[in-house]
Amino acid sequence: MSSPRRENGPVNRSKDGHDNRSVTPPGSAATGADFLQLSLGDAPAGGRSDWLARELRLAISDGRLPVGSKLPATRALAADLRVSRGVVTEAYRRLTEDGQVAGRGRAGTVVVAAPLAAPAPLPRDASLPRDALLFRDAPPPTGTALFTAPPGPDVFDALRTAPARIDLSPGLPELAAFPRAAWLRAERAVLRTVPATDLGYGDPRGAPTLRRAVANWLARNRGIRVDPAEVLIVAGTAQALGLIAQVLRRDGVRAIAVEDPGSLGARQHLRHWQLETPPVPVDAEGIRVDALRAAGAPAVMLTPAHQFPTGVVLGGRRRRELLDWAGEGGLIIEDDYDAEHRYDRPPVPALRAMLAEHVCYAGSVSKLLAPALRVGWLLAPPRYRDALVDAKRFADLGNAVLPQHVLAHLMESGELERRLRLLRTRHRRRRDAMIEAIRTHLPGAVVHGAAAGLHLTLTFERRPDSGRADTELADTDLAATALAAGVKVQPLSWHGQRPHPPGLVLGYAASSPAAIAEGVALLGEALRQLR
Amino acid sequence: MSSPRRENGPVNRSKDGHDNRSVTPPGSAATGADFLQLSLGDAPAGGRSDWLARELRLAISDGRLPVGSKLPATRALAADLRVSRGVVTEAYRRLTEDGQVAGRGRAGTVVVAAPLAAPAPLPRDASLPRDALLFRDAPPPTGTALFTAPPGPDVFDALRTAPARIDLSPGLPELAAFPRAAWLRAERAVLRTVPATDLGYGDPRGAPTLRRAVANWLARNRGIRVDPAEVLIVAGTAQALGLIAQVLRRDGVRAIAVEDPGSLGARQHLRHWQLETPPVPVDAEGIRVDALRAAGAPAVMLTPAHQFPTGVVLGGRRRRELLDWAGEGGLIIEDDYDAEHRYDRPPVPALRAMLAEHVCYAGSVSKLLAPALRVGWLLAPPRYRDALVDAKRFADLGNAVLPQHVLAHLMESGELERRLRLLRTRHRRRRDAMIEAIRTHLPGAVVHGAAAGLHLTLTFERRPDSGRADTELADTDLAATALAAGVKVQPLSWHGQRPHPPGLVLGYAASSPAAIAEGVALLGEALRQLR
């Protein structure tokens, strides 16, 4: 940075003292604190230079201080504003660095450049349409309004930042149980031993130590046998979906079928990458493979172990039908998002364990440890592996190395399995608290998919008073009313592309039994209010 | 996972003892260790179940064990192979989990499914061509061959993993100086204080604490005033380029002009995102703005503080010409990759400091701390901000949170500036060692851009013996010869799209003065060998 220049111009103080301060600019018109309408009352304590620089920039940009005009001397302006001279000097220094003013020796500090006018738009290729998804005209909705508009790409950010006392939105494990001490111990071990060369640019496929640990984890916990060389470390399932979408799109694929109801978030990711997402109905056995055939898409995204959001397990007959479909050239994208969490039933093997040649398999630590870690893994059929590595390389050159080593430590030491057992006990207690509260406060609601996972789904199919179909209820209204009462939930309709009964998707893993009971009671009130 | 079933079939041992073991399958033909040609000599110690499962899968897939045939009883096969019964049980369990065999009670363990035949290709939309960049037919070149083919997308991986005693490839700071103790201290503080809610899904723009720290860092070190709300945290400059490329492409932009010579890596990233990269010549004042105008691209990627690879600083007149070009609607992408590293000259202000409305600015900690951290930042004009946040969201939902907090600690505590001062001293010594060695061992070479950064560029324009132009020399041959002698360097021609004199790009920051001296001496020998 260039050192700040000091202006040496005459002190242009006006004669009529404090109550009418003004400063004479080169063009002889008076400028100064008053002329510029500067009032220290507007300045935040401790940020006065920032404030003054901003005010002066504003004055330059709106013509009150035109190019060629002279700024007040620092000493004078400081006295006018009753601030230390350093505040003014610092503000002038910033404008100097911006190139908007320059010291001119005895002539003082002079405005040399107005900020540029609003930039002209880039010349665009008219054959490429401006992407309506990316270039929005309206700001995203906030508060309960976030349930009245169709959910946009930032709807989960809006829901996350919406204030609410009780958060029953799905997708989170108990974050308070994050193993901070174990993480720090592992980090210490890693920092003691990791070679300096590992701190340079790394293998875009991930650190070998984590790829090995993940292969072992998948063998122990998901029945998957995979060579570590085939494991691609990614920044969570979201990135895995994005990479798959890019590669399939570049391979000529235009559509990936999805479960209906099915994850809104996953669908948004695929659509962002310009893939269509034809909906395929889900029934009590999971995705309907006959309807998948009818949809005609070359690939399908599935949550077979615990369907999101219904919690259905993909049945044996459907698995065989899917196998046939895949054998004819279909590709399965298996999102194994919460399969490690189960309470009342045996584990469900991953499709990848049976169908390696036809399955892109994605998993992550988001539901095991914390989403904020942004670490996941992707297994793919051989024909897509090189392309996926390239996609990962050009996404970010590979995941950060230190957290990969730390995670490998936690996986190989058994720490992660210990945590999973602990979570299982806690989550089960919370789930039971939620079901109990639903029985009490939402007697007409039907509970789905509570044998596993971190969430359950409620549907309101009949009114408890009359037993008639609840055709009047909009679950978005229910979610909005609940949010106004301080409870965060997701409406089932967010996750459907076709019509479904009104419902809610409720996470229980991240809240205490007491908060769950209170939250569900408030939901009951909200429902009564709406009816 | 389902629990392993135990087969109870009869032990079908043959009568003629050890030397001719065989087992009778349901179809009455003999199968067993011999029939399957199993030999324990092939099995790695400690991995016998793995080996046996693999062998059995092979036998099923090539028809030696057809569907319907029965596996030998575990006890029998264990005796045949002289392994413990557990080894065989475990191998069978894996095949059961794969769905290839099933326990049939008294009938034993039976093959129920052959592995699927090679999968049929996905139905593709013929209007979308298969992407030649992503779907390659040939494996990437290795060894010195990596310099004979045009550099592909994995060329930097190939160079990184190529064995060499001395690594003078550019782009790395001294990794041995990574502040491990300070990092661990900061991590401990973060783990003690970070709220559990911060471990969930976060703001895709980055953690507020790091965005604030980066804004302060840029103000102190790069003369940039920016509101933390405008800082987007990204996974390094590579990701920043990718996000910009995606957004511009979706806004209808087809080409981004680049400096020539200019970074091969950056160019590969832009091309991956389907942007053309018309080359614009660089002279002693930096990019030629007249040629940029002639190129007609709506945007340009620049390294103004220390042009890569020539090390030229963008001159004052060129800055003003660029300002005019941008004022007419051009967009500048400023890659401020190593601007903090300077030795013999004052800092060069970032273009972003003067031209906020027209500059996408990218920086990272890769050259300050370590590339393996994968943290950087992106500032963009307001009209692109929403779209860039969306692009980041759909790339990976935002950077991992813990390392962001740790880095914010290091930035706000002054640790990062302390490290920068330390690095500056060490790097300067290493640079001086390299220049000294070049004078001794490569007397005809011209050194470029050594006043700053982590690398310098050599060109071989005239033969030292005759003074004539060195038209015969190919710098890729020189790099290949050097690699064979144990020294890793990058040929200048990798970084040019138009013809340039033969040259090398040499990093000095990551090697000791002794290694540098030896490496340059070996380069001198390689050059003499080639001439």
Image: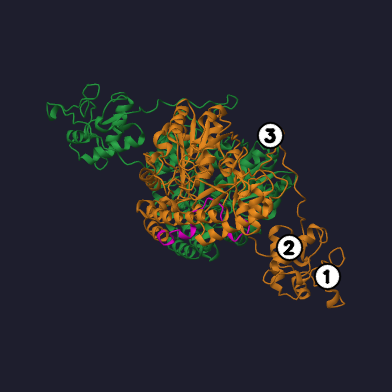
Chain colours: A green, B orange
The alpha-carbon separation of the residues under discs 3 and 2 comes to 39 Å
Query: Which residue lies under the disc numbered 1?
Result: B34
Q: Are marks 2 and 1 on the same chain?
A: yes
Residue projecting furthest to the left: A16
The alpha-carbon separation of the residues under discs 1 and 3 comes to 52 Å
SS at circle 2: helix
Task: List x then y, in percent, for residue A52.
Answer: 27, 35
Amino acid marked by disc 1: Asp
Q: At 70% across and 37% down in the image, what residue appears?
A: A296
Q: Is residue A464 visible?
A: no
Query: A282 left or right of B117?
Result: left
SS at circle 3: loop
Task: List x then y, in percent, for residue B67.
Answer: 80, 58
Q: Which mark is residue B54?
A: 2
Query: Which residue lies under the disc numbered 3?
Result: B128
Q: Which is in the foreground here, disc 1 or disc 3? A: 3
Task: List x then y, in percent, for residue B399.
Answer: 48, 48
For marks 2 and 1, the one nearer the N-term is 1
Q: Is residue A409 magenta?
A: no
Residue nearest the observer in this picture, B355 or A159? B355
Q: Chain of mark 1?
A: B
Residue projecting furthest to the bottom: B17
Q: Is residue B346 visible?
A: yes
Q: Which residues are magenta?
A: B161-182
Task: List x then y, in percent, for residue B324.
Answer: 45, 27
Q: Quadrant of residue B228?
A: top left
Q: Chain of mark 3?
A: B
Residue nearest the observer in this picture, B195 or A126? A126
Query: A338 left or right of B200?
Result: right
Residue nearest the observer in this picture, A420 or A358? A358
